[in-house]
Image (spheres, rainbow, N blue to C red):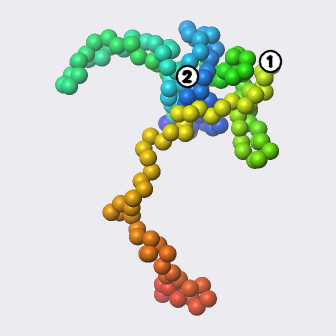
Amino acid sequence: MGWKAAEKLIRHWKVLRGDNIMIIRGKDKGETGTIKRVIRSQNRVIVEGKNLVKKHIKGGEGHEGGIFTVEAPIHASNVQVVDPVTGKPCKVGTRYLEDGTKVRVCRGIGASGSIIPRPEILKIRTTPRPTVAGPKDTPMDLVWEKTYDAKTGKGMPDL
């Protein structure tokens, strides 16, 4: 990717995977759906069951060929998050609650100003964190071992 294309990438994404959105442009205009995947390198999203296209796939070893219906990516500017109260598309803004947590809110003309909940799918980790130390993990006694003393300078390499 060249620098011109990199300049056009969205820096602060307003839509997340799992959001309920409405398509505002294109052949599926006015339909609502859930974001299945976000492709940040192309500024595009894939919406479940929307923007279906026919794809011709050549047969090969291990799979059969044919004509398949797949979901094509939609540009992020052609979708908007649905207001959870009114059910209409709205712009997304951010606010801080009294306890300091950052939340997304609906904004724009006719928007309710309500909080947009974070999608549940983002709270689930695809690969769980390891609970047992593996063979390449450093043992804790070596981690906590003091190897440098700031007062005496002991532990500094001789340069």
Asked if residue 92 shows in the view, the reply is yes
Q: Amino acid at mark 2?
A: Thr
- Between residue 157 and residue 34, name the one nearer to us: 34
Q: Quadrant of residue 138?
A: bottom left
Instruction: Judge left or right: residue 41 versus residue 15.
Output: left
Q: Which residue is mark 1?
A: 110
Name the outermost residue toward the front: 131
Name the outermost residue toward the top: 27
Instruction: Judge left or right: residue 141 versus residue 79.
Output: left
* Residue 104: image location, x then y, percent: 70, 34
**How would you rate the neighbour count of disc 2 (Cα within 10 Å): few for under 14, some for 14-19, many for 20 or more?**
some
Q: CA distance from mark 1 to mark 2?
A: 22 Å
- Between residue 109 and residue 97, name the one nearer to us: 97
Q: Provide the secondary structure element on which disc 1 rests.
A: loop
Which of marks 2 and 1 precedes in the sequence? 2
- The residue under the point 50% across, 23% down is 46
- The residue under the point 41% across, 16% down is 70
- The residue under the point 50% across, 26% down is 36
Is 1 located above or below residue 107 in the figure?
Answer: below
* Residue 80: image location, x then y, percent: 65, 21
* Residue 47: image location, x then y, percent: 52, 21
Q: Residue 34 has which mark?
A: 2
Is 129 located above or below residue 106 in the figure?
Answer: below
Name the outermost residue toward the left: 61
- Between residue 80 and residue 6, name the one nearer to us: 80
Q: Amino acid at mark 1?
A: Gly
